[in-house]
Image: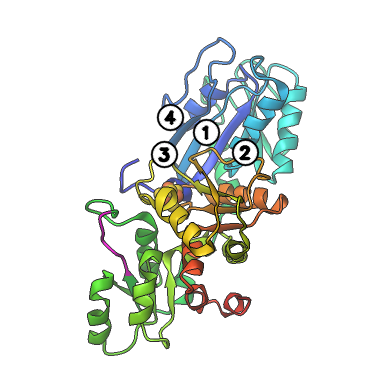
Amino acid sequence: MSLNDTPSGERIHIGFFGRRNAGKSSLVNAVTGQELAVVSDVKGTTTDPVYKAMELLPLGPVEIIDTPGFDDEGALGELRVKKTRQILAKTDIAVLVIDGTSPVSEWDNELVRLFRDKDIPYIVVYNKADEKVCPVSDENAIAVSAKSGQNIHELKEKIASLAKNSGNDRRIVGDLLSPDDIVILVTPIDAAAPKGRMILPQQQTLRDVLDADAAAMVTKETQLAMTLERLAAPPKMVITDSQAFGMVSKIVPESVPLTSFSILMARYKGFLDTAVEGASAISRLRDGDTVLISEGCTHHRQCGDIGSVKLPALLKKYTGRELNITLSSGRDFPEDLSPFSLVIHCGGCMLNEREMLYRRRTAELQGVPFTNYGIAIACMNGILKRSLGIFPDLADKL
Ligand code: SF4
């Protein structure tokens, strides 16, 4: 992905599912107009999911996931369903590809059950319509031919209309602003900052301020006092990186709302309440407890050593406990959270909303508190209440 591309977390994730040889990979290629998937007549060519970020008209930025055959003989039933569930955890729209020349199988029905279970909008595609005319009565289904291109355009339109209904209209901060407000963004530039650019949550917040027709001033924490002094009137709010919160909170007058990028991102991803509640579990940790620190990507290029070094050190110092720390990253998020007393997740900027929701629900269902980096750091620095001041209902609960 180039730096100007839409981040993965903002793309609609479209998963193509079905039996081996239903023509799934050919259909993916026909829909995307690219040789994305390996196509062969040998059953089960796709053994691992293939991901591809792209622009797909009329939808816009999407991430296409071509999945392995659901009836793969190599994978035992339970493992196959487990793998499929993992992919479904991030799937916004599911496309079930059925070989229209064969009867609908039990595998196909099982996939539909999984989609419904997970509340995922789906469309059933009867492929190979060039070989056999397949009458379709259900408006959630369509007959197409990946080979001849028949109805591929109509299929894309159907996927687009499902996407429209499944969209997230949450804002990062724009809904809290009025046109002509001034917002100050504080972005420390230290050794951990990526060279020559700003990190994704900062970029996204800045963009949302501009979308609200408000004005943004961006400064390092060292120039914050000077910036505030030179403004003719106090800003509408100050948004800071969590790591600079201690210093920034001393500079910003109590009368000016102060929050952090992490808090805004947790709200944007739909789990601010859970994360605030989860942070309260930090003070209940005991010797021997295990904390899962989970990152949404493996390259850590936005987050440096926060999860692997800074957060474990802060947790041990704050609690005074002998804690065990387990790290997970990328697509690996443990399904069994019973060994853990707390999950602290990164901001999840590379994960889509559905996947963050899945991770949070997995923790909730197993009764394991779930919070995120920024909120945990704010809590341990004693500044969580102040940083939640723009959400009085939540701040009052602390
Ligand atoms: S570790 Fe998390 S917050 Fe950091 S860049 Fe990766 S997905 Fe984004």
Task: Measure the C-alpha gap from mark 1 to mark 3.
Answer: 11 Å
Q: Quadrant of the C terminus?
A: bottom right
Question: Which quadrant of the structure image shows residue 240?
Answer: bottom left
- Residue 77 colored in magenta in the image: no
Task: Measure the C-alpha gap from mark 4 to mark 1.
Answer: 15 Å
Q: Which residue is mark 4?
A: 33
Drawn side of residue 272 relative to residue 299, left or right? right
- Give the amino acid at mark 4: Gly
Drawn side of residue 142 relative to residue 318, left or right? right
Label 3 SS: strand
Q: Residues within 10 Å of mark 4 (few under 14, many from 20)?
A: few
Asked whether 191 or 258 is in front, the reply is: 191
User: Residue placed at 55% from the left, 10% from the top?
Assistant: 41
Eye-nearest disc, 3 or 2: 2
Q: Which residue is mark 3?
A: 54
Label 2 SS: helix
Magenta extent: 186-191
- Give the amino acid at mark 2: Leu
Task: Measure the C-alpha gap from mark 3 to mark 4.
Answer: 11 Å
Q: Which residue is mark 2?
A: 88
